[in-house]
Image (cartoon, helix red, strand yellow):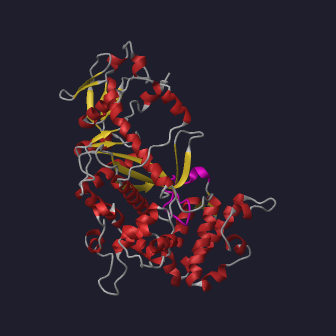
Amino acid sequence: MRDALGPLFVDQDFAEGGFEEMYADLGRPGISPALLVMVTVLQFLHNLSDRDAVVAVADRISWKYALGLELEYTGFDASVLCEFRARLVVGDRADALLTLMLQRLAAAGLVRAGGRQRTDSTHVLACVRRLNRIECLGEALRTALEEIALTSPAFIVPLLAPGWDERYGRKVETSRLLRRKNASALKLAEQIGADGQSLTAAIDADPTATWMNDLPQVKILRELWDQHFERTATGRLRYRDTKELPPSAERIRSPHDPDARYSTKGAPGADTVEWTGSKAHLTESCDEDLPNLVTDVHTTPATEPDVTATTPIQDKLTDRNLKPGEHLTDSGYPSGPNIGASLERCITLIAPVTVATGRGAHDATFKPKDFHVDWQAGTTRCPAGATSISMRPKKNGLIRIAFARADCRPCPIRAQCTTAAPHLGRSLEIHPEPIHTARTRMQTEQNTPQWRQAYRTRAGIEGTISQAVRGPGLRRSRYRGLTKTHLQNVLTGIAINIRRLGTHYDTTTRPDRHPTRIHTLCTQHDIPTAA
């Protein structure tokens, strides 16, 4: 790759554009950022730690050749990589780094706009241990105490009471705190709540301690107490039931990573996947005459469905001048608004569309696609031939269609149309004309052999996700926080591109796989392959 394309990054790139304020104008010159970014990419390519990556720079000839270094180069300290990532995580520099690489690849004719691209997501585990409710509260209080004691230990001393060392002197584990005979989990939760209340009350009562409210762990402590406790009329805290807790999208699952969220996917049962962390959406080109390269990496909280990522991904591809002509996704990405947004961007969204939704999906009654809409006349004809009496837009952007009771009551196929009360007529809601027409067309096309043949290309993104998980380790986040996790995901995408570009430019002929003895005998004796 280096022989064919030369260096993908140069130092001047990090002094302009999205990297303009990445380094100060004054002071001693630092290590080349172009070198550091390639070392970081190679580090993720081989799934190495910072220390192992620095050792590889010093003693691997292949790395020195790829980086353009002299054989005598001895490397640098491992802490430099951590400091460099801290600069990259600011703002949109991670996405700008991928954009910069794609600009070089587009100039070399390796990626282009107007082709095919495919997208899929996978779950990413947060860099924290899984905590139950009591452990989460206890850890929040313990970390807040540690943060305050770091600078103001005298403030903590008056609050210390018997039992605090056992509960907060080390990491909080219910298996340790509840191992006593007749130990009660509810009493432990209430005790932790009272201890946290005494800390926040002491901060509020001391005018000189208001600065503590700006400490990150104190903010998390207060938010968790609001989520898990309710203040009664007597001033005591009541431990909320599980059903009273806020939705998973708002609940903090660990004080060590407030961005991590708990989520599940898959059908209920043995195939259900549960995790605490985030989601990574990978998009790659899939033109037959070009290598498949990652063109976008999108990171979202674990609780956000895939449908929320479709339009942002297309917008980023458009900003990079890599807008696809066809965008292949699974059934989790299309929706009415996304279909409309794709039409506005002149992107053909190829994805399975749910045919039956709402009550019709459960009652096996006629679906919106079974009704004929005359947009010019503003009327709709039902399967029995009756014409609607109204088509009115709603505040949510949908169009409500209503049929007369006089037509629906005596209808011979009423049981196939609606399960409403006998005195009510059929009503349904559809999207506006462009979206409804596109959605109906997609539902019709997805049953044709031509559509199935085109959609088969989408399956290749599964191999890309497998490569990212098994090689660079995309499944587990190395860092805490959504922004740092996104940086890891972007560097993983760049590392995959480096690997695939190396394969693309590798002209070495590889021997065919050695055949088995049975295959050799069948070939020698002209035995057909299939019966």
Taking the magenta stretch, the answer to whether it contains residue 258 is: yes
Span highlighted in magenta in the image = 241-261
Quadrant in which residue 386 is drawn? top left
Residue 414 vertical placement versus 493 (above, below): above
Main secondary structure type of the part rendered in magenta: loop
Give residue 127's position: percent from left, percent from top. Answer: 54, 62
Image coordinates for residue 247, horizontal then vertical, percent? 51, 52
Could you say which is closer to the camera, residue 284 or residue 35? 35
Q: Which residue ends up furthest to the front in the rendered image?
A: 524
Res 305 seen here: no
Q: Nearer the viewer, residue 392 or 127?
A: 127
Residue drawn at x 26%, y 74% is 12
At 56% from the left and 43% from the top, the residue drawn is 272
Q: Quadrant of residue 199?
A: bottom right
Residue occupying the far right of the picture? 181
Q: Is residue 147 magenta?
A: no
Image quarter where the N terminus lies is bottom left
Image check: 238 left or right of 395? Answer: right
| Side of 386 where 199 appears, left or right | right
Residue occupying the point 61% across, 64% down: 137
Residue 222 locus on image (x, y percent): 54, 68
